[in-house]
Image: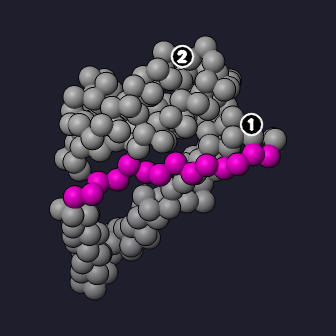
Amino acid sequence: MAEGEQVGIPRLVSQRPTVWLSMAVTVLGVIAVVGWGVATQTGTNRVMAVLLAVVLPLAVTAVVWRRTWVDTGDGTLHHRIALLPTRSVSWARAAALDLERNRAGQLALRASGEGGTVRVTVLAIDMGGDRSADADLLRFLAGEIDRWAPERERLTARLRAQAAYVETGADLRRSPLAAHV
């Protein structure tokens, strides 16, 4: 693997406090149920409460401890969740490289290959609020795809059109990629 710069890709997270509040209340609720189950239940219920006490921190860790990056030296997109193996897809050898909607208001750049599938959310129009990857990131991704997989010009044109639109500050629901969500 050629050494290159590792460029981190920020996650497209909600800026709405109600989303974060509801997540915190859910975690606290699960902790309360686990505490009640361990303190008052016997047999199978207690075992399930202890099991949930083990699974909850793992689930929270998997949600919080994620990293996606591009290695510019070898044209590879990487994604890692906690201590699980890293998924890596080369732009040049990707079997599939396109935009994919998740049917919940988000659109992601999806790269699939021998190393698995890596997704980078580029647009979200959902209950977490309307948000898009910033123009610099969209142009960077388009540039890397052009560099390593020049035959994907239709995809890179879409990313660049979104970047230009994002810079205007206009309503994301009317953006070039919004039609694909």
At which x and y percent is residue 13? 35, 53
Q: Secondary structure at mark 2?
A: helix
Residue beneath disc 2: 153
Q: Secondary structure at mark 1?
A: loop
In this view, the residue farthest toward the front is 168
In this view, the residue farthest toward the right is 2
What residue do we see at 29% from left, 54% from top?
14
What residue do we see at 22% from left, 48% from top?
129
Instruction: Work out how far the residue at label 1 is from the one at label 2, CA to CA, in angstroms.
Output: 19 Å
At which x and y percent is residue 87? 62, 42
Q: Main secondary structure of the magenta part?
A: loop
What's the magenta region? 3-16
Could one spot residue 55 in this view of the protein?
no
Could one spot residue 63 in this view of the protein?
yes
- The tag on residue 74 is 1
Image vertical order of residue 27 relative to residue 88, above or below = below
Q: Residues within 10 Å of mark 2 (few under 14, many from 20)?
A: few
Judged left or right of residue 157, residue 48 is: left
The total number of labels drawn is 2
Q: Are marks 1 and 2 in contact (CB under 8 Å)?
A: no
Q: Is residue 2 magenta?
A: no
Looking at numbered disc 1 in the image, what kind of residue is underneath it? Asp
Res 121 quadrant in image: top left
Q: Residues within 10 Å of mark 1 (few under 14, many from 20)?
A: some
